[in-house]
């Protein structure tokens, strides 16, 4: 082979194995697959996270951009009088709100808004200057005021519907019905006691909406129904409640008293028909009290308790109404001297005479025969020392000490109504027992409860009826109490055409520092008249208690006239016929609360 030939000759090239090239192609595919798997895993993880981890955030975003939620108000139940007339009801008012983030010049907006709302400019401007997107400007705005705000068309200011509680009888029933907070929660009276029954539950509507405000066909549409509160029908008569408050306030003014309480009821059922408190405000004017002193005020009843003392004496078989005994005008018991109101020689007084003339000494002498344990036992059976079962807020049980804690004079003082305290309602319930042939019937103020769409149901009393004295003892006492009004200390409680039975009470008021007299030796008094009518078949019972009267201090003159006036109105209102079955005529021109308000 020549040299030139060697210079141009090429060695044969080795073929590359196919393996490495196939490996690179397969690796790229594997990487691609892994990347795709990773992306898929990421998408799955994100989906899971969106579905479960950020569900609330997504719903919040959706609600603000796509879903619209609207609150549906539940309506608080009404409180009605025995005739179905409203004593408390809810009407639609408005709340004024602002979105501070949309208000460029709070001062300018406040200047336009303040005259309409009747408020100052500066506080309004301050409310609209706070960070955030919502702030209440004013709650509980009447419809005409809300309409005036809407007419201003202020950017960032709007109205929301809310309920307002109205009380047709106003102050004349406030101590019974009570009141609610701005958010419709009960804070006093029946509103508080039965808040769970009256309270409503709000509902909501959730809809999927287009940006223009139209519903998305077939879109999300969820609703939670609002639940209205139950209606409560009371035993109270609205018109008689108004009259009771009016009569009591007038009597407090005429006797120049510090205040008073009046209650009207039906003995057979324990129903409260009217219950009012009068007091004086800071200026000395007589006003209807917000505190229901018929159940919160425990006072010493004085001679009114003698009806209970002698009911016990008669029931125990110690005497009959005609049984007589020698009664002096004064008596020393332990270390104290007791006297009758007017001096008199030793008299041969019957049990009837002692009650009719309201003799302290005669009562003490019979109380001693009954004994301390016997007197305490009967008084507790009459309901003293225990709450009535109405369960109204702040109700007092009064004070009846146990015999073990009685002093040497306790039997004497308690038998004539000193050293023992009770509420006006407790004393009325005790006299109802005499009216009911000796059977104690618990007090009632709620007649029935009606849930939305349901039937009325009557609530059960926490107490049960019980016999306290025999039918015969109660009948004897009714006749004696009738003579108290006919010829004794209660003449001014008489009602023409009807036999009235009742008892007066005039008691010294305990001084806060002890004893009964103040530093100057002066006494303050509580005057009471309590009774029922017609005496032979009682349909109504009443009690009037006047606190610290000054023009006259006696139950027969300070309290009995108001008793008679309300009794006359109630008899005609409830069409209770007199014994001769005459046809009573209504003396009230108004027949509904609407007429009364007009």
Image (cartoon, rainbow, N blue to C red):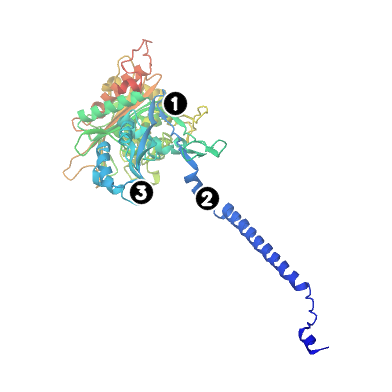
Q: What is the quadrant of residue 98 in the picture?
A: top left
Q: Say if residue 347 shows up in the picture.
A: no
Say if 13 sits above or below 314 in the image.
below
Q: Position of residue 116 (x, y in %)?
A: 27, 36
Q: What distance separates the C-alpha of mark 3 from that of mark 1?
A: 61 Å
Q: Which residue is mark 3?
A: 101
Q: What distance separates the C-alpha of mark 1 from that of mark 2?
A: 61 Å
- Helix, strand or loop at label 3? It is helix
Q: Which residue is mark 2?
A: 58
Q: Which residue is mark 1?
A: 269
Q: What is the quadrant of residue 75 in the picture?
A: top left
Numbered badge on residue 335: none
Looking at the image, tell me whether mark 3 or mark 2 is earlier in sequence order: 2
Q: Residue furthest right?
A: 1
Looking at the image, tell me whether mark 1 or mark 2 is earlier in sequence order: 2
Looking at the image, tell me whether mark 3 or mark 1 is earlier in sequence order: 3
């Amino acid at each position: 082979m020549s040299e030139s030939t060697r210079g141009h000759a090429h060695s044969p090239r080795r073929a590359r194995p196919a393996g490495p090239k196939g490996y690179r192609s397969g690796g790229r595919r594997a990487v691609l697959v892994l990347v795709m798997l990773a992306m898929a895993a990421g998408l799955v993880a994100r989906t899971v996270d969106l579905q479960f981890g950020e569900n609330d955030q997504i719903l919040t975003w959706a609600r603000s951009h796509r879903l619209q939620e609207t609150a549906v108000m539940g309506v608080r139940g009404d409180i009605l009088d025995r005739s179905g007339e409203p004593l408390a009801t809810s009407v639609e008012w408005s709340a004024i709100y602002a979105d501070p983030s949309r208000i460029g010049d709070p001062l300018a907006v406040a200047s336009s808004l303040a005259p309409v709302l009747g408020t100052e400019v500066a506080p309004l401007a301050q409310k609209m200057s706070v960070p955030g997107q919502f702030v209440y400007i004013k709650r509980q705005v009447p419809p005409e005021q809300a309409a005036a705000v809407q007419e201003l068309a202020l950017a960032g200011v709007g109205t929301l519907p809310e309920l307002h509680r109205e009380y047709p009888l106003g102050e004349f029933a406030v101590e019974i019905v009570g009141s609610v907070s701005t958010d419709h929660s009960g804070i006093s009276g029946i509103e508080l006691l039965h808040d769970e029954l009256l309270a409503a539950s709000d509902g909501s509507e959730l809809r999927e909406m287009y940006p223009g405000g139209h519903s998305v066909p077939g879109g999300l549409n969820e609703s939670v129904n609002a639940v209205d509160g139950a209606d409560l029908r009371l035993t109270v008569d609205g018109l008689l409640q108004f009259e009771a408050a009016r009569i009591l306030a007038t009597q407090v003014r005429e006797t120049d008293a510090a205040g008073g309480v009046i209650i009207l009821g039906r003995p057979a059922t324990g129903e409260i028909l009217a219950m009012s408190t009068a007091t004086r405000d800071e200026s000395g004017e007589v006003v209807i009290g917000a505190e229901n002193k018929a159940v919160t005020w425990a006072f010493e009843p004085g001679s009114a308790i003698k009806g209970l003392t002698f009911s016990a004496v008669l029931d125990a078989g110690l005497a009959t109404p005609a049984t007589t005994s020698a009664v002096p005008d004064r008596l020393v018991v332990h270390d104290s001297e007791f006297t009758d109101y007017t001096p008199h020689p030793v008299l041969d007084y019957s049990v009837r005479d002692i009650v009719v003339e309201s003799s302290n000494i005669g009562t003490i002498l019979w109380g001693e025969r009954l004994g301390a344990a016997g007197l305490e036992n009967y008084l507790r059976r009459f309901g003293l020392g225990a709450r009535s079962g109405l369960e109204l807020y702040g109700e007092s049980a009064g004070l009846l000490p146990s015999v073990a804690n009685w002093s040497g004079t306790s039997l004497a003082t308690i038998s004539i109504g000193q050293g023992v305290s009770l509420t006006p309602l407790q004393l009325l319930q005790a006299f109802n027992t005499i009216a009911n042939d000796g059977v104690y019937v618990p007090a009632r103020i709620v007649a029935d409860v009606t849930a939305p769409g349901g039937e009325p149901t009557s609530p059960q009393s926490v107490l049960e009826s019980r016999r306290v004295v025999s039918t015969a003892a109660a009948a004897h006492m009714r006749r004696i109490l009738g003579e108290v009004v006919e010829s004794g200390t209660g003449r001014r409680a008489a009602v023409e055409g009807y036999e009235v039975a009742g008892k007066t009470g005039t008691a010294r008021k305990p001084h806060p520092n002890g004893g009964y007299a103040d530093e100057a030796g002066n006494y303050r008094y509580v005057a009471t008249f309590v009774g029922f009518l017609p005496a032979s078949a009682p349909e109504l019972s009443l009690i009037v208690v006047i606190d610290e009267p000054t023009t006259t201090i006696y139950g027969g003159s300070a309290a009995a006239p108001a008793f008679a006036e309300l009794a006359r109105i109630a008899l005609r209102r409830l069409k209770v016929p007199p014994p001769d079955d005459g046809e009573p005529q209504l003396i009230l021109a108004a027949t509904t609360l609407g007429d009364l308000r007009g």
